[in-house]
Amino acid sequence: MRASPMTPIASPASPLTVETIQSVIDAMPMQGRIMLRLILLQYFDITDEEILYIVADRPDPRCVAGSKPTNTTMTKESIKVVTDRRDQYRRQARLKRERTWLQGESLRNLAQLREVFANRARTLLADRFSVSADTLDSLHASARTVLPRPAIRLLEQRWDADEIAAEDYQQQRLSIEFQTQLRMAEKYRTRRILAERERQSALSATLHDHEIAHIWGIPAGSLAARKVKYLTQYLHALQSRLQSSAATTTSPVDLWKETFSVLAEQPIERSLSTYDGLEKTESALIDKLTAMVWGSLPEEIEVKLWTSLVFGASSNAMHSEVTRNLFGLQRLMTILNDMDRTPEAIDADLLKRTAATPKIEVGALETSAEHPVTELSEMQTQILNNMRGEDVSGRSSDKW
């Protein structure tokens, strides 16, 4: 699996490191080590030895009163139950972390692309169609309020009625495209702000108490007591480690918050995804993603597609967390990375997209409608006769 770099959010002068956090957790007792790793499950793993401890530490649900059995036996089924629950919550936490990163990176790339397309459209309007700078500034200012679909529909009607020349049609169509690219760039920047907030929330998210209790199988009261005990022990040990370090001058005020800031700097492991039914077929999904990257996807379809990518809105993913993956976002990032961003390629796409539909002459239609009559060859005649069969309508049947 390929790792992707993260944007650092920890303070540059922070004396806390991932190695320090790891060493402090490793030095804790078994029970405390398990508790800290479960809380920070999106960054740490529970080992097989710790899973065996959890299985042995789980109370027997059949013994609700009286003395508890001292010789608990571990079965393969109980070990599998704990392992599956660990894998389930770890996958959920890490998929959310990866999704928010992919979401922010793809929106950043899309916003940059829309700005590049808008700049190339402005250059084409100025150089090829001799549009004045004041007109271009007016188009830029009204980009947020213009309605592209009615404008394009009116332009098409004028073209069909022969009220506008091909060059004038392309100029006006390119002006509409220029405004559309500007509006989409602003939309992607707004989405990225919201995605960045979600990413910061996901990076500092811990496993909830009911999720830890579901894995460990201990009562809520015992879980709360252990959590307070070992969180306090972790913070005191971390404070002592930082104060004893010779290179440390000042330790962070909030060590718990700084722990997440340091752990968030680690690279993200890309998950292995398979196609999960989004947009019904994989080829249809790739086509829509490609059109979205090039900016030719209609806005109303783009909104639905982005919602499906972010929330995994496929028929399987909505009803089963196991099948939910990041196939769409990963393919979107791949298409963005493989895209030809040269000015020549962008200009060619803009000119092709805004060109008028060629009209077919009336004489050409009449000529194409009159197909020349060709005689059948002997082989073709024999094939038709064999398919038709022998004509026996005038003869009596000899069946009887």
Image (tube, rainbow, N blue to C red):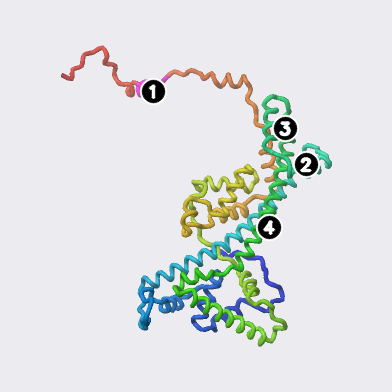
Reading the image, the residue beneath label 1 is: 380
The spot of residue 112 in percent (x, y) is 70, 53
Dot label at residue 193 = 4
The C terminus sits in image quarter = top left
Q: Position of residue 245 (x, y in %)?
A: 66, 86
- Residue 195: image location, x then y, percent: 64, 58
To which residue does mark 2 refer? Answer: 139
* Mark 1 → mark 4, Cα distance in angstroms: 69 Å
Q: Is residue 286 magenta?
A: no
Tag 2 and tag 1, C-beta contact below 8 Å: no
**Residue on which disc 3 sits:** 169
- What SS does tag 3 mark? helix
Q: Which amino acid is tagged 4?
A: Ile
Badge 3 amino acid: Tyr
| As drawn, 76 above or below 373 | below
Going from N to C along the chain, the mark reached first, 3 or 2, is: 2
Other-residue count near label 4 (Cα within 10 Å), few / some / many at <14 / 14–19 / ≥20:
some
Left or right side of 332 for 140: right
Q: Quadrant of residue 25?
A: bottom right
Q: Residue at x 78, y 37 (%)?
A: 129
Q: Amino acid at mark 1?
A: Gln
What is the magenta range? 376-384
